[in-house]
Image (tube, coloured by chain):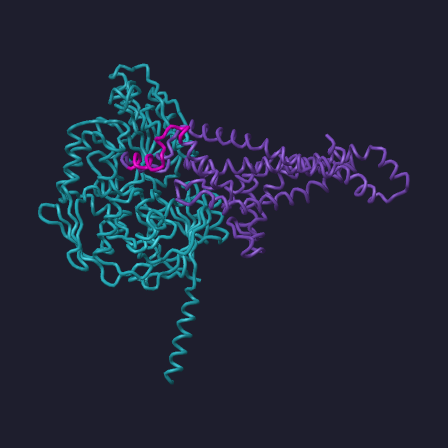
């Protein structure tokens, strides 16, 4: 196992370097000068030139890259062109917010998607199956931003149950924090719940047809036991894979959701940074997300080997 | 009543009074401000925060007169090169440092020399600043500069605590220390900026809130939803399309002011190769384009009539507006005749850049439809804002629908845009006579002389049309009905002096 992990981490290093070159290069190919984006309508040529010098934007791109990656390796991702905050500090500030959103959304998706998938597989062909499928499909097809705005208008404006937007740190006041996050997590979660329901359903259908389920039933076990202990447990293996894949979708969905509900998270940070051509922030974020993804993958593969003994020898 | 009892009663009264006004005012902003250092910041939205955080040497009244703030009296020397100011007594910075002539000297120097300063060009005319005594400052300018006081009525005139500024250097924006009615408490990027009432503020009696919280909420629908649900107390930049709905809501109030800025079409008349097209080469084609646009209809269709149609760099309600050229009615026949005269009887095709947001796209689409009837085919090139600006600067465009947020002094709305080599002259328009007139207007402190120069320049620009002005946006604020005393200003700022909340 250790050798496996070691190998994977070693392979990850060139990948990370490739990602960083790719991001750096692509970003500099974008039209729109960062200094001009910073200045907005107040463009003063002398000031612009001074800023370009200051942030070394006049250097050749390979030199800029070398400087950046050199500093990054020492843990210095630079400062935001827009607010002067260190990029690492910004990321540290925003990441917990998005993680909280992602975890709550994932919980929501699992709470809705897995039981719905199990039930609809079990009641295959009945009206319950039909309702579950239609609901899942609508969950998948309704855009997050629309659902978000509708929910704000209904739940916050009309009913006044939950705050329309904003964020409060979980550590300061867990209850308020959860209340704030409930709607965004729901919006983000429903989209995923649909995917999860569909996958749970097909995995369950496969398992329900298998011999050991028939055997379990023949032994006269209670239907509940058959369903949960025998069928679902085996169906869960592919579902775990799906969930780890959904994590990427979750981060992408968070961008929009955070924008609508004004949650100061990672997604909002990256969108604003791109629009403001805040190079240092975009680079820092992409590098960190890249690394996070690679490690998520390594982690998922390791978990797989733990769950499924047959994979260990491969 | 014993002295002790009196004291207790007084204390209780203060405490209750405190409770009645123990209020937090929550303001929804359209964007997250950039760095909170007046010398480095550049966003409009940042200035809204400064209005509560940092006092300036001068302020403006709602009708754009310059009024005293930290400078109480001032006078120009006869030759217009020396400005002497008396300063307000008893003002302290948020860190307890005194405000005095030395502080002014420090601040002007900082704006001029800090590497990251964006104020350099605004006060470039200043050649010297000295403290005559503790409360008197003399500023010397190289040549008369009529625009200087207006610059000092904005970020260039905001006073920072010299001690704090010296210690923090370019990082002051992480913890700004000024002398305004509120002091900085905390900022969480993209989430909130919290300010707290500054007890030693010289005009503290006019401040009725203990704290003010600015919340950036970019989506207009969501911003309004937050106001309706009571999560915020007021918001800036309500979408014109929401005006009717706010008016119909008894729980809300609406305030608006015509802005000092404008939206228009900048035409490439000399910025490289791409100026070589009918629109760039022939002012008659530009005039035809202008004549084909029904500015009032544009205002009605896109902005529900909330904005002000315009055809000059200042709005029709400004004292600097030239009445000899009122906003023209649409005249398709005249437009067609002009095109024919210019040799384009069969029509012309032009490209127009626009920022790819729904409102600006709609503006250009309406113009496209109107111009088509005169034989001008517009091909729309929607671009992300930063890209659009850089194409415009590089001369890689035919025409751009773009605007300007406006300046208190008219010079700020026109000089850099049309003078030869002007920093914002993306049209690369050049006319020695316009240069001469606008430089003259800039150098005189005599309003009559300035007005005459602007009128002469307007007359030329109305023919040459490097910029076709369209409309002047309105700043629209929506407030909870319980918010009292808010005064709309044409600069779009939110001044909290005198604002209160009733229960």
**Coordinates of residue B354 in the picture (x, y in percent):** 38, 29
Queried whether the magenta region covers residue A48, the answer comes back as yes
Of residues B367 and B227, the one nearer the viewer is B227
Of residues B140 and A6, the one nearer the viewer is A6
Q: Is residue B96 above or below residue A313?
A: below
Direction from residue B330 to residue A284 in the image, left or right: right
Magenta highlight: main SS: helix
Q: Which quadrant of the figure has residue B423?
A: top left
Name the residue located 30 percent from the left edge and 36 percent from the top edge: A50
Q: Colour of chain A?
A: purple
Name the residue located 38 percent from the left edge and 76 percent from the top edge: B10
Q: Is residue B256 above or below residue B9?
A: above
Q: Is residue B127 above or below residue A7?
A: below
Magenta highlight range: A47-63
Name the residue located 29 percent from the left edge and 15 percent from the top edge: B344
Task: Note whether residue A135 is visible.
Answer: no
Of residues B213 and A63, the one nearer the viewer is A63
Name the residue located 36 percent from the left edge and 30 percent from the top edge: A59
**Coordinates of residue B188 in the picture (x, y in percent):** 45, 50
Q: Which quadrant of the figure has residue B73?
A: bottom left
**Coordinates of residue B386 in the picture (x, y in percent):** 38, 32
Placement of the N terminus of chain B among the 4 image quadrants: bottom left
Direction from residue A15 to residue B358 in the image, left or right: left
Q: Which residue is most to the front?
A: A3
Q: Which residue is most to the left?
A: B78
Q: Which quadrant of the figure has residue B284?
A: top left
Of residues A133 and B374, the one nearer the viewer is A133
Q: Colour of chain B?
A: cyan
Placement of the C terminus of chain B among the 4 image quadrants: bottom left
Task: Note whether residue B245 is visible.
Answer: yes
Queried whether the magenta region covers residue A125, the answer comes back as no
């Amino acid at each position: 196992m250790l050798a496996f992990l070691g190998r994977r981490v070693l392979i990850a290093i060139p990948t990370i370097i490739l990602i960083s070159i790719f991001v750096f290069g692509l970003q500099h190919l974008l039209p729109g000068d960062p200094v001009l984006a910073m200045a907005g309508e107040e463009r003063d040529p002398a000031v612009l030139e001074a800023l370009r010098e200051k942030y070394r934007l006049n250097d050749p791109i390979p030199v800029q890259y070398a400087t950046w990656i050199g500093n990054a390796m020492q843990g210095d991702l630079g400062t935001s062109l827009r607010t002067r905050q260190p990029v690492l500090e910004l990321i540290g500030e925003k990441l917990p917010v998005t993680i909280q959103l992602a975890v709550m959304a994932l919980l929501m998706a699992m709470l809705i998607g897995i039981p719905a998938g199990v039930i609809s597989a079990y009641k295959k062909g009945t009206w319950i199956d039909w309702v579950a499928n239609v609901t899942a499909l609508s969950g998948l097809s309704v855009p997050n931003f629309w659902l978000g705005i509708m929910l704000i208008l209904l739940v916050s404006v009309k009913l006044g149950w939950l705050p329309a937007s904003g964020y409060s740190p979980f550590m300061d006041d867990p209850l308020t924090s959860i209340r704030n996050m409930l709607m965004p997590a729901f919006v983000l979660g429903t989209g995923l719940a649909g995917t999860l329901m569909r996958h749970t359903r097909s995995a369950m259908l496969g398992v329900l047809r298998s011999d050991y389920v028939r055997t379990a039933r023949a032994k006269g076990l209670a239907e509940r036991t058959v369903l949960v202990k025998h069928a679902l447990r085996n169906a869960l293996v592919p579902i775990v894979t799906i969930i780890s894949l959904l994590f990427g979708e979750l981060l992408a969905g968070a961008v929009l959701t955070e924008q609508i509900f004004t949650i100061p998270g990672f997604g909002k940070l990256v969108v604003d940074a791109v629009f403001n051509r805040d190079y240092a922030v975009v680079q820092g974020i992409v590098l960190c997300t890249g690394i996070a993804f690679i490690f998520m993958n390594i982690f998922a593969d390791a978990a797989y080997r733990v769950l499924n003994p047959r994979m260990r020898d491969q | 009543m014993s002295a002790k009892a009196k004291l207790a009663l007084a204390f209780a009264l203060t405490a209750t009074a405190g409770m009645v006004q123990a209020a937090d005012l929550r303001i929804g902003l359209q964007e997250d401000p950039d760095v909170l250092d007046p010398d480095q910041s550049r966003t409009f939205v940042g200035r809204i925060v400064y209005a509560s955080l940092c006092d300036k040497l001068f302020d403006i009244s709602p009708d754009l007169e310059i009024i005293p703030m930290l400078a109480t009296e001032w006078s120009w020397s006869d030759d217009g090169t020396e400005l002497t100011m008396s300063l307000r007594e008893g003002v302290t910075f948020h860190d307890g440092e005194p405000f005095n002539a030395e502080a002014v000297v420090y601040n002007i120097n900082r704006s001029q020399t800090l590497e990251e300063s964006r104020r350099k060009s605004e006060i470039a005319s200043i050649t010297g600043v000295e403290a005559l005594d503790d409360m008197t400052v003399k500023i010397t300018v190289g040549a008369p500069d009529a625009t200087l006081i207006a610059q000092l009525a904005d970020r260039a005139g905001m006073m920072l605590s010299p001690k704090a500024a010296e210690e923090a250097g370019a990082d002051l924006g992480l913890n700004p220390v000024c002398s305004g009615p509120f002091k900085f408490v905390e900022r969480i990027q993209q989430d909130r900026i919290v300010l707290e009432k500054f007890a030693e503020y010289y005009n503290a009696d006019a401040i009725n809130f203990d704290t003010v919280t600015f919340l950036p909420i970019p989506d207009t629908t969501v911003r309004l939803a937050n106001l309706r649900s009571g999560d915020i107390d007021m918001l800036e930049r309500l979408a014109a399309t929401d005006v009717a709905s706010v008016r119909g809501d008894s729980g809300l109030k609406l305030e608006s002011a015509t802005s000092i800025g404008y939206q228009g079409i900048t035409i490439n008349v000399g910025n490289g190769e791409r100026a070589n097209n009918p629109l760039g080469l022939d002012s008659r084609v530009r005039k035809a384009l202008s004549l084909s646009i029904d500015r009032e209809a544009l205002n009605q269709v896109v902005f529900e009539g909330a904005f002000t149609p315009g055809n000059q760099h200042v709005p029709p309600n400004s004292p600097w507006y030239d009445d000899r050229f009122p906003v023209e009615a649409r005249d398709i026949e005249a437009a067609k005749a002009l095109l024919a005269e210019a040799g384009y009887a069969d029509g012309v095709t032009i490209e127009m850049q626009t920022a790819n947001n729904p409102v600006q796209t709609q503006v250009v689409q309406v113009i496209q439809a109107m111009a088509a009837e005169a034989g001008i085919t517009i091909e729309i090139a929607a671009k992300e804002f930063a890209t659009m600006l850089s194409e415009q600067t590089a001369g890689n465009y035919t025409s751009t629908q773009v605007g300007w947020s406006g300046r208190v002094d008219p010079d700020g709305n026109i000089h850099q845009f049309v003078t030869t080599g002007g920093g914002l002259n993306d049209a690369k328009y050049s006319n020695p006579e316009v240069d001469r007139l606008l430089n003259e207007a800039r150098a005189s402190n005599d309003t009559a002389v300035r007005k005459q120069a602007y009128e002469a320049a307007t007359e030329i620009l109305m023919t040459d049309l490097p910029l076709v002005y369209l409309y002047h946006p309105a700043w629209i604020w929506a407030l909870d009905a319980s918010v009292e005393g808010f005064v709309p200003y044409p600069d779009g700022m939110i001044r909290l002096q005198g604002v209160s909340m009733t229960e």
